[in-house]
Amino acid sequence: MNIIVCIKQVPETAEIRIDEKTNTLVREGVPAIINPFDTYALEEGIRIREKCGGGVTVLTMGPPQAEQALREAIAMGVDSGVLLSDKAFAGSDTLATSYALSRAIRQMGRFDLVICGKQAIDGDTAQVGPGIAEMLGIPFIAYVRKIEEIREGYIRAERLMETGYQIIEMSLPSLITVVKEINEPRLPSLRGMLKAKKTNISVWDVEKLGGDTGRFGLDGSPTQVIRIFTPEPRKGGEILQGAVEEQVAALIERLKETKLV
Amino acid sequence: MIIKKEQEQILNYLEDASNLKGGKAESVFIPENEEEVVEIVRECSAKKLPLTISAGGTGVVGGRIPFGGAVLSTERLNKVIEINDRGKYAILQAGVVIDDFLKELSERCLFYPPFPTERSAFIGGNVATNASGEYSFKFGCTRRYVRRIKVVLSSGVVVEIRRGEVIARHGFLRIPSTDIEFKIPDYRMPDIMKNSAGYYSSADMDLIDLFIGSEGTLGIITEVEVNVIEQLPDIFFCAVFFESSQDTFSIVRELKAKKDILDLLCLEYFDSNSLYYLKEFYPRVPDAAEGCILVAARMSSDGSLDMWDELLSKYNPVDNWFGDSEKHKEELYGFRHKLPEIVNDIIRKNNRPKISTDIAVPEAKFWQMNDFYCERLSSSGLKHVIFGHIGECHLHVNILPENEEELERAKELYFEFAGKGIALGGTVSGEHGIGKRKHHFLKMMYGEEGIKEMGRIKNAIDRNCILGIGNIFTKE
Ligand SMILES: Cc1cc2nc3c(=O)[nH]c(=O)nc-3n(C[C@H](O)[C@H](O)[C@H](O)COP(=O)(O)OP(=O)(O)OC[C@H]3O[C@@H](n4cnc5c(N)ncnc54)[C@H](O)[C@@H]3O)c2cc1C
């Protein structure tokens, strides 16, 4: 089974700083990690290979230093890595990113399953996985919490819903995005680490991907970010005191004041 | 200064990680500076009121638990006074939390080598117990890094002791700016890597070493100056699982022999029982594993990982977990830290005290000691785990008794282990101290006479005999 896992390198921090001029994340001085949700995708890919044989390729688009994320994936047990890196990709929104990744996947030849994390912790859009599937014209299941069965041409998986889960059958090749309930990502192994240090990472530029040049990078990104900001932390709520009747009366009064009732 | 007298507010100070019950105190003083410490001590001395010093409360021998009298908590003496990058030292108030200290150092690319596994401990608590840490295999224990302390004696006098300034002469030590002079102990400490049992003693001993590891019985440490080093780059952690304990022990032998070539910082061990308990929280622990080591080492050259790979593969590991990123190292560190936590939880559920040994022996006798543990424990049928600092010949045996009968047998076993450890030239406490739990073992180690010598020193320094009552000595 040929599996492709798409990952993203993200800053490791909960307190993201934003450059107010460029509306982009400040990455200086913040260590980069593999997007945590993508580590579940990597783990699942490796598990499927361990069960069904085949190979796992990890794919990312990013600046040259994103190569580090690919090496870390290889240390975990992935077979090979491809980095899409080119100035032409800069400024990609989710649409352009999906396009670039889907072009790359096409270039890779025959595949059975693409796995993505449910979303990246820096953008939180959850659009890229489904976007890739659309552009490749393959079916997908988002928010997979368990793969019940997978074999040549067939997958049955549990999709996490707000109130329970769905069981979905789907043909392969196809794409899934996974949630953290699906597994416990492994740590790298020493052998994997050695391999990671020695493996050549293929770096592909825009030319290699072919397709419509107008759909990459900033040109291919209809999204316009007007402003990004850190919201004011919410002020602590108010706790009404007194007997129940008093509290109810006070609450009604307050709701009227704010014209909510 | 904050003074707490309401029992509800005091409860916190009546326990630590030892699960020792029955603590009580009439008040807790929380001074904010040295003058207030002096004030408290004077008051207690005048009333002959016992005073127990409290730090992070992570101690495992009940050292900070008061049995009457008052508590002096160092929690507000928590300022990092100076970090000197060029001189490579730091000056801290006693109540600085180790974790905070490490973070502050790391911002300046500095590091405090003997930091203990439990990072919520205070630097004062570490000095008072001569704690050792994750990397003590390489760097040794707290004592080696303390260059100066400030201590408030029970008389209220503040003394500053800098390493190298007050050395025993003709068998006597004198505390500067006081009339306190006493004979140093005749007993000699075992020749091993770490020892936290009773007062320090050696022929040409430094006064500072007497206070380090004195478990709150001689004075209140208010300020500490420690050596720091440059941050260590390129550290990796690796947990390696083996199918047999024999393979595990064989690799330990080889690793110890190659400690320097491999630039090993830490060499820890988990027996099969430890892995059994850990598996519940770490399902990836391989079923086939009968033993595990956790190493931390430096990747000094490009080839060092190849060297490790070659070495490990000789012993047929079933799996290994490698981490060189902060995130993965944190995970592996969490794995190591989880075991004592699991054990403590079981103990709490069983509602029986933990029988946990802290015996360390000389290198040449280690395997003999280890065989003795394994043999006696397996024939006892008691639930137990063996884990810890195998690099320093210092394994912790934790027995988990489920009823009174088992508890009695566990205690007997502990006596046997202590007896064996002493006979092999070891110590009954490698790092945790004596506290209120291990008096009898200290007596086994140094004899009645040794305890008397310590008592003599205690009485000379703490004349009113109010400090840390119950620690090291049963009664003064
Ligand atoms: C999960 C876990 C892991 C641990 N791992 C290690 C380890 O790897 N190595 C190790 O050595 N220990 C370890 N310990 C034990 C403990 O962390 C150490 O003994 C630590 O040094 C205690 O520090 P504390 O600040 O918590 O002190 P406390 O428990 O508050 O007090 C300890 C003793 O020091 C005295 N004391 C405290 N501050 C002062 C002061 N300013 N002046 C004079 N006396 C004072 C107290 O009176 C008491 O006797 C571990 C404990 C736990 C729970």
Image (tube, coloured by chain):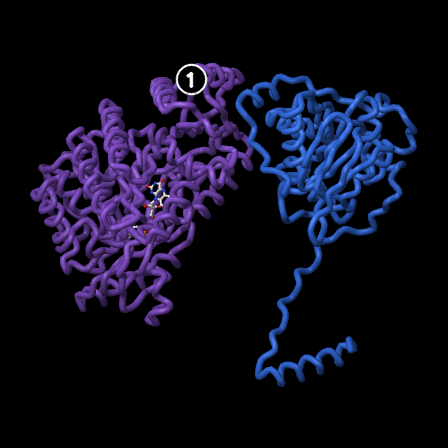
Chain colours: A blue, B purple
- Say above or below: B48 vs B392: below
- Say above or below: B449 vs A55: below
Residue B166 can be seen, yes or no: no
Q: Chain of mark 1?
A: B
Residue nearest the viewer, comparing A173 with B266: A173
Measured as percent of width and height from the top left, residue A48 is found at 66, 28
Figure quadrant of residue B118: top left
Q: Is residue A69 left or right of residue B387?
A: right
Measured as percent of width and height from the top left, residue B286 is found at 48, 29
Figure quadrant of residue B72: bottom left
Residue A135 can be seen, yes or no: yes
- Say above or below: A176 vs B439: above
Local secondary structure at mark 1:
loop
Measured as percent of width and height from the top left, residue A56 is found at 69, 24
- What amino acid is labelled 1 in the image? Tyr
Look at mark 1 in the image and give the residue it sits on.
B315
Figure quadrant of residue B291: top left
Measured as percent of width and height from the top left, residue A50 is found at 62, 24
Who's the residue at 80% across and 29% down the image? A173
Does the closest atom of ligand 1 sit within 8 Å of the Cβ of label 1? no
